[in-house]
Amino acid sequence: MNQERFDNRQIRTIHFIGICGTGMGTLAAMLQEAGYQVQGSDQNVYPPMSTFLSSRGIPIIDGYGAENLKPPPDLVVVGNVIRRDNPEAVAALEGGLNYCSMPQALHRFFLNSSQSVVAAGTHGKTTTAALLVWLLTVAGMDPGCLVGGLLANFHQSYRLGKGTYFVVEGDEYDTAFFDKEPKFLHYQPKICVLTSVEFDHADIFPDLQAVENAFAKLMKSIPGDGLLIVNSDDPGASRLSRGASCRLVTYGFKDPAQYRVEKVDYGVGATRCSVCGPQGFKVTFDSPLAGAHNLSNTMAMVVLGRELALETGIIQQALSTFRGVRRRQEVRGEPNGVTVIDDYAHHPTAVQATLEALRPFYGNRRLWAIFEPRTNSSKRRVFQERYATVFDGADLVLIKEPPGLDRIDPEERLSARQLVADIKARGVNAHYFAIVDEMLPFILSRVESGDVLLVMSTGSFDTLIDKILEGLSRLA
């Protein structure tokens, strides 16, 4: 098998193992648009990526098997969820096929001819990357991008672009079974935004120090003539940024941030903030995004705009016309006066920040938090006590039993029942559910017009949102 020794000019057909991962599916569409013949395989696929690929005419083979590599493709791209014993990985190994990881392919086919702009951090990197892309687009710079979510402004999660810059979401997760370094080390940023550094990905990082070691490598990978934009309010990000040898510009809500939010009004349906910065910079922005965490992400965009000498009007235009990212506070529908929101929040910090953001944005309306702990970290006990403290901003909390607990040692598993008991002990109305089919009738029997239903999961949640919307429509 030949890793990274192939000639791009000899590649015509490309097969993706695990094509429905967000990054994998996006890269597959990019390569198809660039003129390559693309197909892939996966299992247990669900929207939006499955429907996105189907709409592009990219074949998705259901399930993995050696026969999927016949006739042999010129290149096999291996997703990071694929194990060494996957039948297609085995067939590719034994057949001596060219192969690489998703980050390696992204670099070889796209990043090596652009200036890479990487948005990294434990939280906010998807929205931040999307904001950066939209800013450069509004400014007429025609950037390329690959972001870990469907961008509402483009109706897709990528653009090829013909400009100088290529924006990519920098994930700290490992690259592939043959490469355990973080994905973002393959992206070689010329400009990097670092939003935050906390413990996450408990399945691959044993502790916070291991996470910080990964980000420290990213800091050192930025060239001396590069630019690092850092959220100085985050202790981990601020501390690790000192290891970079490039120019550093900071943003935040408090000193010593160079670009700082002086005043903010989190109103119903809108956010207004006043920002000050170097050389007497001072401006008031209006944002359609809710919450302090989104304002922090917005500040990264403001800094990049200033560093690229863009006019303030361009920055405001980008912000006011930004339509967000699917599954990031995405309003899926409002039947019968009930607002149903889809959100990707899973880390305790993100769950708390999302609830705190929505409370003023929707005024005094009753706020439900409907949560499925699904990631490898969230369904482990590492966050058991922390989760109990982050739902205080909700009026009603529904917790579903995490899927796939049988693959985790019993002593490491999150106890959803205990979590509900601990939330109740804090005076919050909370309920446990083993399956979605038990949760749905509870919701439909108690929901009232004016309620806001925040549904949080990194997966399909067994299509709960679709079922809620359908059920509410029937109640009309």
Image: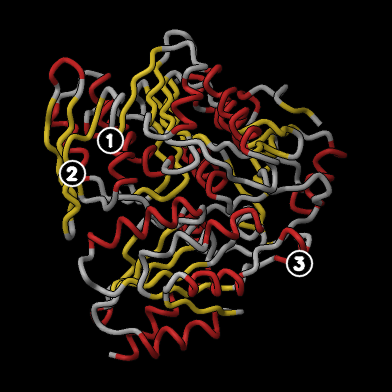
> CA separation, marks 3 and 1?
43 Å
Task: First in sequence, mark 3 or 2: give its number.
Answer: 2
At numbered mark 2, what does the secondary structure look like: helix, strand or loop? strand
The residue singled out by tag 1 in the image is 253
Residue type at mark 3? Answer: Asp
Q: Where on the picture, by quarter, is residue 211? A: top right
Q: Nearer the viewer, mark 3 or mark 2?
A: 2
At numbered mark 3, what does the secondary structure look like: helix, strand or loop? helix
Task: First in sequence, mark 3 or 1: give its number.
Answer: 1
> Compared to 268, does 130 lie above or below?
above
Query: Looking at the image, which residue sits at the far right?
Result: 94
Total numbered circles: 3
Residue type at mark 1? Answer: Phe
Asked whether, in this view, residue 94 is left or right of residue 401, the answer is right
> Compared to 292, does 278 lie above or below?
above
193 or 65: which is nearer to us?
A: 193
Residue type at mark 2? Answer: Val
Q: Percent x, y for residue 322? A: 25, 45
Asked whether, in this view, residue 346 is left or right of residue 401, the answer is left
Asked whether, in this view, residue 156 is left or right of residue 240, the answer is left
> CA separation, marks 1 and 2?
10 Å
The residue singled out by tag 2 in the image is 264
The quadrant of the image that shows the C terminus is: bottom left
Mark linked to residue 406: 3
